[in-house]
Image: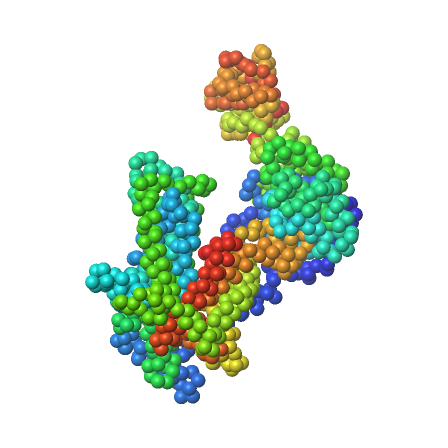
Amino acid sequence: MTAPADTLAPAPAASSRSGAALLWLRIPVLIGVALAVLVPIGLVVYQSFLSAPFFDKAAAFSLSAYDFVLTDPDFHDAFLTTLIVAVGMAVIAVPLGAVLAFLVARTDLPGKGWLEPLILVPIFLSAIVVAFGYVVALGPVGFVSLAVKSVLGFIPWRIYSLPGLVVIAGLSHVPHVYLYASSALRGVNPEVEEAARTMGAPPWRVALQVSLPLIWPSLVYSGALVFFLGFELFGLPLILGDPAGLIVLTTYLYKLTNLLGSPSYQLMAVVVVAIVIVTLPLVYLQRVLLRASAKYVTLRGKGAAPRILPLGRWRYAALAIVLAWLLVTVVVPLLGVLLRAFVDRWGEGVNLLDVLTTRHFAELVQYPNVVRGIVNTLLIGVIGGALSVGVYALVALAAHRWQSRWAAAIDYLVLLPRALPGLIAGLAVLWVFLFVPVLQPLRSTLVSLWLAYTVVWLAFGLRLISAALLQIGPELEEAARVIGARPGRVARDVTLPLIRFGLVSSWLLCFMMFVREYSTGVYLLGPGTEVIGSLIVSLFGTGALDLIAALSVVNVVLIGAGLALALRFGVRLHG
Amino acid sequence: MAELIVEEVRKRLGSNEILKGVSLAIEKGEVVALLGRSGSGKTTLLRSVAGLETPDAGRISLGGRVLFDAKKRIDVPAEGRGLALVFQSYALWPHRTVADNVAYGLKLRKVPAAECAARVRGVLDQLGLGSLGDRYPHQLSGGQQQRVALARALVYSPPLILLDEPLSNLDAKLREEARIWFRQLIQRLHLSALYVTHDQVEAMAVADRVLIIEDGRAEQEGTPQELYENPRSAFAADFMGVNNRFEGRVTVTSGDAAAVEIAGDGWSLTGTCRRDRRLSPGDRAAALIRVERVAVVGEAEADTLPMRLETSLYLGERWEHQFRRGDLAVRLWTPWPLQPGDYAVRFPRESLWVF
């Protein structure tokens, strides 16, 4: 070993600053992300200032579209309704989510093991499927409604109403609050709860006066998140709001499509701008709040043993609360969809057992667009999901340990699409494919759809992969550098192998999100780009409920398979 | 010829200057320890040599080859420097076996597979890891992981090995054994190494020379013996060994400037002035004496002070006592217990350093 040192492969030019490493990857990625994010948004803004669609030769710069939309009473209605729904959702979801989180994370609630994944199920369900499930279960002639009516003589609820919409939307966003609240609660030192307990406080007082106040930054953050998601809501208001004449901003946009006969792109663009003006600050606010809550976390004692609070005689009352929420939010709509898919007809006096049939599923095959939709959904979920994870990994690697202001630029860029509800991102991507000549042939292929999905889920996917990257101690990469590996080689030999599991679990999560997705594909829907979600949206216009029910079941089964795989492999269900 | 030369390296992080111009040279076959408290800048200096930090100013060269020169804008990336670094956490790659971890440096250097396997086996045998090549890092004990990290650094015969607190993750007993093992290995292989540690005993045991770093500056450099017996500052004196440190006021200075009398509330002692500047009567001064130099003596000799025994602790192989007189409290060790009472405590004037 006293032999002269082995010579390395010729070292890079001695003058290269070590900060310049990996630029061959970083610069193209930065440009790619900037293009994918800024071009669609830029096009929307540009379109909003035109007097006609951008492909129309008569289109000129004008504020007429703003004039039309901002003075339209329907727009004012939609804006107000959206605001009410968003606030209502937060008011319902935050307390309930916090309570569920406390029960699961901090107490000896029975059956926590299987309750925890169940609580997260609504995150992975397609809102359009859930909305349909509520219609067939709790609608004026729904299964449950009819059963209740036969006992009480009347139906004590009305889902086609503003309160109905708010309650359902609020309940189905409880898991979002639960996620952040439970991870914050797991960081609370159990001794502060035990201290309250030894002074004689019952569990509910411990929750209200000790644990939950300690995690208030997380609750504020999740409240802002739910409020923000209220602006994205599309499936629920489309199906539950429309019959009652309720419109929100997204459904207003959707209806504009056919308002003037010719495509009224300039009006749609104005609505998009209006939505983004609200959502963009909200996205920024969430980022600030998340940072604040992360700081708050570090203030607490560490090394807390995972001890739990015994609920005593409250145990089963607590379980009842959780089960009641699950029943209303998951079981009722899913059972509704399932039942509806297997019966021919129903109503007062019909014994459901007599009308069971699998005919609706057999019918699926008769529609080529439906078959294509199912195949496409699988393709976009499995292959598209993998490709997207590849893209996200590339972006994450490019930003990984990049000490530069440009890395911060990527950080902000990926936040932008977060402000675009899926419906709008799909519309913007459609316009990009119409606007850019070289992309036009790809318009009616899955490429356009995949691009839209990838952009919409950019922030989500990146968070998953960065979380995996954060697990790698910097010295593991530095060790390879010092031994003689260049940055590209370090990524290949050390970084990527170490996040293998993270990549696979991101793929599974992206699969579920892509299969679930329904709004992003709405404007991109055409022969060749059908997916289950957007087909259901368009089928609603035709009233083909048999088909919708069967398609919904297929959708739920696909997502269920993904969920089962994820749980089998121990994938964390949240990034 | 000097192997590593570090000249006036500066590094600033935000408004905080971590290195304020540190210079250092390591001869071939020499082990130099960077000794300092946490936050002193010692690890930053090591990482600057490795190429993992970019200093703001200064020059670093190895065997005549310039690795870093702020003026000429030369900064050879870490992978181009041909060094080896043993991390505090060992940084073994969990997805590779022990043999693959060790072989990686040879693979990067395109060493043929057969030779590569032979050299990996050779170095593993040398470090007593012969049978563990197929294991994964998590299947090894802390001490074994530490040796794998060392094997990974040694296998491609780098001209200089950088070690960042390599023993600090071992428990105390293991660390003492590892110290001896490590010193033997260094001598057997004629390694040149830069060794970062906060443990003065470890630095003295392992290194040929020690550089004490404090607040981004070199405080003092020398052999372990020089540093222990002839510290130039109160900081260096206090950093090494176990000490009694107290403050007093200078009362008498002698003609030869070396002997100083220092006094406090009810006591007065004669010591040796260790400061560059002359002390004059009335100055406040810090006095320092190693605990092992203070002794209880039978009757009043020179340099003694009558003191009262306050507390005694039984430490196994010795007793530790605290004595007091006025505002002066000192610790000393005896091999036997002492009865409560008053004793004559001796502070040899050549060992009582006044700064």
Q: Report whether A568 appears left or right of A253.
A: right
In this view, the residue farthest toward the left is A153
Q: Nearer the viewer, residue B165 or A139?
A: A139
Residue at image point 60% right, 30% down: B241
Picture quadrant of residue B183: top right
In this view, the residue farthest toward the top is B299
Q: Is residue B237 above or below residue A245?
A: above
Residue at image point 54% right, 68% down: A383
The C terminus of chain B sits in image quarter:
top right
In this view, the residue farthest toward the front is A354
- Across and down, in percent, residue A225 comes to 37, 59
- Across and down, in percent, residue A559 comes to 45, 63
On the question of residue A424 being in view, the answer is no
Residue at image point 54% right, 59% down: A504
Colour pattern of the rendering: rainbow
Q: Nearer the viewer, residue B141 or B330?
A: B141
Q: Nearer the viewer, residue A439 or B281?
A: A439
On the question of residue A148 being in view, the answer is yes
Picture quadrant of residue B337: top right
How many numbered callouts? 0
- Across and down, in percent, residue A235 comes to 36, 68
- Across and down, in percent, residue B104 comes to 69, 52
Residue at image point 40% right, 51% down: A115
Q: Is residue B288 above or below residue A241?
A: above
Picture quadrant of residue A324: bottom left
